[in-house]
Amino acid sequence: MLIKQAEFIKSAVDKNSLPPEDRIEFMFCGRSNVGKSSFINMLCNNHKLARTSSNPGKTQTLNFFEINHEFYFVDVPGYGYARVSKSIKETFGKMIEEYVTTRKSLKMVFLLVDFRHKPSEDDCLMFNFLKYHNLPVTVIATKSDKIKNSERKKCKEVILNTLELKEDDKLIITSSEKKEGLGLVLSTLDSVIEKYPEYPIKMDFDDVEEV
């Protein structure tokens, strides 16, 4: 796959502001500051597409990006940041839970974890939550360029053991700086898209609700 077109479409704060389910959606989730925006920008070869921030927890909406006029990337709020108020965390949690459990066009979730650190309790909860709802999950280990080559095997084993990944679970080691893992992720996108030839769905105007 070659991503030739990538464009921010809209932000959604609840189910009523979500776009029509006419395209396959790929969700990107992870702890605040895990590198979601940089990862999305790497995939699209556009460092300005998804905004990166030095303020963890800044993303507070579901952000939809149209890719190749064919499918959506969905960037969801980062979790686990202490300075975000409890009420906002609860709102985020309910919004993401509703999206994950009801969105039929959501076909793959990329769960990002920092390759340098042991997955957090929140990472484990998210992974188990997604698996419980039978959503295909690809674990993305970010920031591989920040560790020594001699430490890579150990870091990989920590992720595998902490998340209790099975043989059929997928883990891709990546670096947005060096574009490591780019080809594997694009191949994963391709494999999902090939499973659903009915997408994108042509929708009648009457099928689209005004938001």
Image: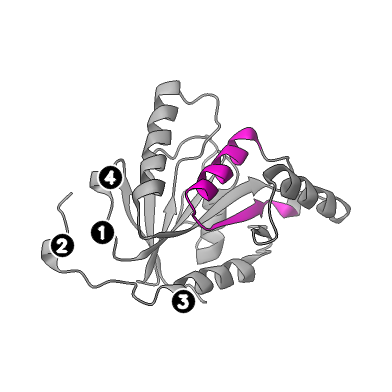
The one of 52 and 207 positioned closer to us in this rendering: 207
Residues tagged 4 and 2 counted as in contact (Cβ below 8 A)? no
Dot 4 or dot 2, earlier in sequence: 4
| Residue 52 seen in the current view | no
**What residue does disc 4 label?**
15
**What residue does disc 3 label?**
194
Q: What residue type is labelled 3?
A: Glu
Dot 2 or dot 1, earlier in sequence: 1
Crowding around mark 3 (Cα neighbors within 10 Å: few <14, some 14 to 19, many 20+) is few
Q: Is residue 123 magenta?
A: yes
**What residue does disc 1 label?**
20
Dot 4 or dot 3, earlier in sequence: 4
Magenta segment boundaries in residue numbering: 120-144
Residues tagged 4 and 3 counted as in contact (Cβ below 8 A)? no
Residues tagged 2 and 1 counted as in contact (Cβ below 8 A)? yes
Disc 1 element: loop
**What residue does disc 2 label?**
207
